[in-house]
Image: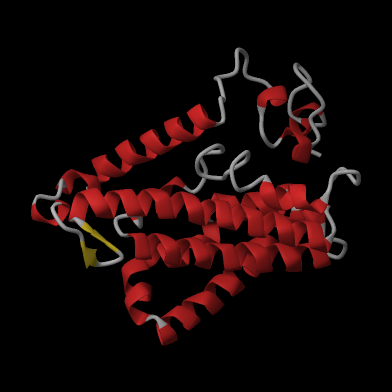
Amino acid sequence: MNENRPLSREFTKGLIKENPVLVMLLGMCPTLAVTTMASNAIGMGLATTFVLVCSNLVISLLKGVIPKAVRLPCFIVIIAGFVTLISFVLQRYLPGLYDSLGVFLTLITVNCIILGRAEAFASKNKVLPSVLDGLGMGLGFTAALFVMGSLREIFGAGSWFGLKLPLISKEPMLIFIMPAGGFFVLGCVIAAVNKLADRKPPKEISCENCPSAAICGAKGKGEGCPSESEGGK
């Protein structure tokens, strides 16, 4: 991490500029699967945020003692432990949400957002920046799911958080809560975010245009990914 970069930057980057769903296009499986209702979207987002923050914290603390040869299996074991914990909590106190999320709650363990932040950030940075990074990415993920879940529930079921809405509830457009509707809403939200951020497609694909270039260590166009240039070291 750049020591001159303020800690607030580690938190805010995941909200919009490096949003894991709307910019990096990660975690598409739960994004499309659980956003048929706003409540499910919030539940999945907050559960993922908890796992992100806790796993980043532990991995940052243990980065000096985890052998490089087995770092990924170790990361997965740590992440799985927190996923098991949040699963027990939801099953005990929010059984309805636990049943609604189903297998996708367990699949947080292999969510590429969490493993990606562990490998690209937490394993290379101090504890506080790693916690803020996980919190920002988790809240950005939650916000994206909430927007999608709200739109799909309002137009597809005529309700919001289970409350029926006048007029819309009489003739809801069921396609919005179907898989095709999920892809449509995701595309519209991504397009809206790009428009608001005035983000244009890169003229050339390279590390220079990657939102994670600063994390992985790439310095500019044409240099390529460090893992490739250094033989995966």
Q: Residue at x 14, y 50 (%)?
A: 172
Left or right, 115 with respect to 37, comes to right
Residue 171 percent across, percent down from the top left: 9, 50
**Quadrant of residue 101 in the image?**
bottom left
Disc count in the image?
0
Considering depth in this image, is 207 or 17 the residue closer to the camera? Answer: 17
The correct choice, above or below, for 13 with respect to 221 in the image is below
Left or right, 73 with respect to 181, comes to right
Considering depth in this image, is 232 or 51 the residue closer to the camera? Answer: 51
Q: Residue furthest bottom?
A: 92
Q: Residue at x 26, y 42 (%)?
A: 181
Considering depth in this image, is 108 or 141 the residue closer to the camera? Answer: 141
Residue 149 percent across, percent down from the top left: 35, 54
Q: Residue at x 71, y 54 (%)?
A: 133
Q: Residue furthest left?
A: 170
On the question of residue 70 being in view, the answer is no
Residue 41 percent across, percent down from the top left: 40, 59
